[in-house]
Image (spheres, grey):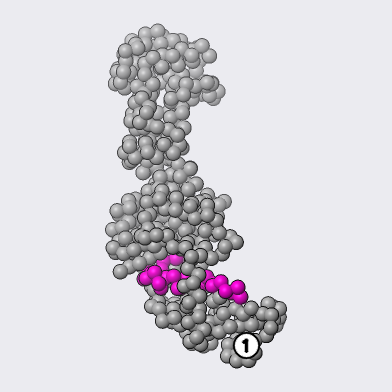
Amino acid sequence: MIVTRFAPSPTGFLHVGGLRTALYNYLYARKNGGKFLLRIEDTDLARNSDAAVEAIKEAFDWCGLEYDGEVEFQSRRTEIYKKYINELLKSGKAYKCYMSKDELDALRKEQEARKERPKYDGRYRDFTGTPPEGIEPVIRIKAPLSGKIEFDDGIKGHISFEAADILDDFIIARSDGSPTYNFTVVIDDALMGVSDVIRGDDHLSNTPKQIILYDALGFKVPKFYHVAMINGSDGSKLSKRHGATDVMEYKRMGYLPQALLNFLVRLGWGHGDDEIFSMSDMLRLFDPKDINKSASTYNLSKLEWLNAYYIKNSGFYELADEMLFFGIDFRGLPKGELLMSLLQERAKTLLDIKAGVELIVNAPSSYDEKAMKKFVNDESKALLAQYLAEFKEDLENTSEFEHFTMEFLNSKGKTLKDLAQNVRIALTGGSVSPGIFEMMEVLGASEVKKRILEFLKA
């Protein structure tokens, strides 16, 4: 069975790079009828945040990434880690190192002076003497001093490390007894049955250390897939200045979860020239072997394009549910479905829909100066006044408003362009809006007449 996991540290909110990693793991597990696990790596008690844990869960809920079983917390697995550390000590595959910080600092300075790679020199590797007093030992693994550490990466292909170039007897438990990252990851992945590890290639340097631990503990090594990073538009590491932020901020900015997931899956993976991928498409087509080896580029305009597509193609009730987050209940608005259809056609984000609702539903308290200068003059206001004088309050639907208006204009020898912008400004305060006849139906004849009258007084 394919078992994947997402294992964030709760030291901050879930960002888009992390969500992409979670998505890839989720898709691979679900496509193969496997399990997708969520594990919180919270052993760094000084930096942990309960709010961050809740933010991760909230982001998963919003995006619809359901994990199997309960959330695992490393902080609750301390006894398990101690058990395996003791097993390695008893078997002679790990040992206690009493090297003081001063000794380690002195060693590193000597190595740097000789232009050597700083590393532990193994002085306690085979130590059998009396331990020095006053020093709580760390626990180090007996790493291979020569040879190669090799594995086949599902994305990058065959990878080989020279042990002498990258390794020393690295620490698996600190002097206070707390286990280190690489050790806990191996124990957790092995005991949770994780078969495939899809993660960022910033973890690639950890992989040889973890393979050594898998071997030392007699655990099966999982299949690794190291995904290239996401870069900003300028080629540098993705950061907030490129527009990347925590996942729930995208909700607050008016993006739909399906648009965000579609955007993220394409940051490194693709299927031909296709751009639109529903969740069912992703589950059918995704294979981590097709993830690109090179870094992808974050492009906010692409996300906006996708979001506009999903907004335009969403049903009324789906969008109405999303708009409740912004305090707008379309179900409770008169002509709510018509209003939604007017706004979703041109909206890039849900905030555009929110602004559109406020523009149409709320009577204007002022009028755009540029629009007034460009479109409003004595002649246009006189025509609008005539239109108001003949306006019928029994008009109800779009076609009736349009038919009445065109008959009025024909009788005056005028065209729609002679009237439309003045009506639009009267109804909304500006020169940009959805179609005027649809807006009239949304507002109702009485409100239309009232707004035109107020405009003519201005």
Does 394 lie within the magenta span? no
Whether 59 is drawn above or below 312: the answer is below
Q: Is residue 314 visible?
A: yes
Residue 16, percent from left and from top: 47, 54
- From the viewer's perspective, tell me whether residue 67 is left or right of residue 209: left
Residue 261, percent from left and from top: 39, 52
Quarter occupied by residue 352: top left
Q: Secondary structure at mark 1?
A: loop
Residue corresponding to mark 1: 123
Q: Is residue 269 visible?
A: no
Q: In the image, what residue occupies the spot 37% across and 70% down?
A: 193
Residue 46, percent from left and from top: 60, 61
Q: In the image, what residue occupies the spot 45% across and 82% down?
A: 216
Quarter occupied by residue 336: top left
Q: State the residue in front, 399 or 364.
A: 364
Whether 36 is drawn above or below 423: the answer is below
Binning the other alpha carbons within 10 Å of mark 1 as few (below 14), some (14 to 19) or many (20 upward) gives: few
Whether 25 is drawn above or below 367: the answer is below
Q: In the image, what residue occupies the spot 48% across and 43% down?
A: 252
- From the viewer's perspective, tell me whether residue 173 is left or right of residue 425: right
Does 198 lie within the magenta span? yes
Residue 280, percent from left and from top: 29, 53
Q: Quadrant of the N terminus?
A: bottom left
Q: State the residue in front, 68 or 313.
A: 68
- Please, what is the three-letter code of the amino acid marked with disc 1? Arg
The stretch of residues the image draws in magenta is: 174-199
Q: In the image, what residue occupies the spot 46% across and 19% down?
A: 426
- From the viewer's perspective, tell me whether residue 165 is left or right of residue 324: right
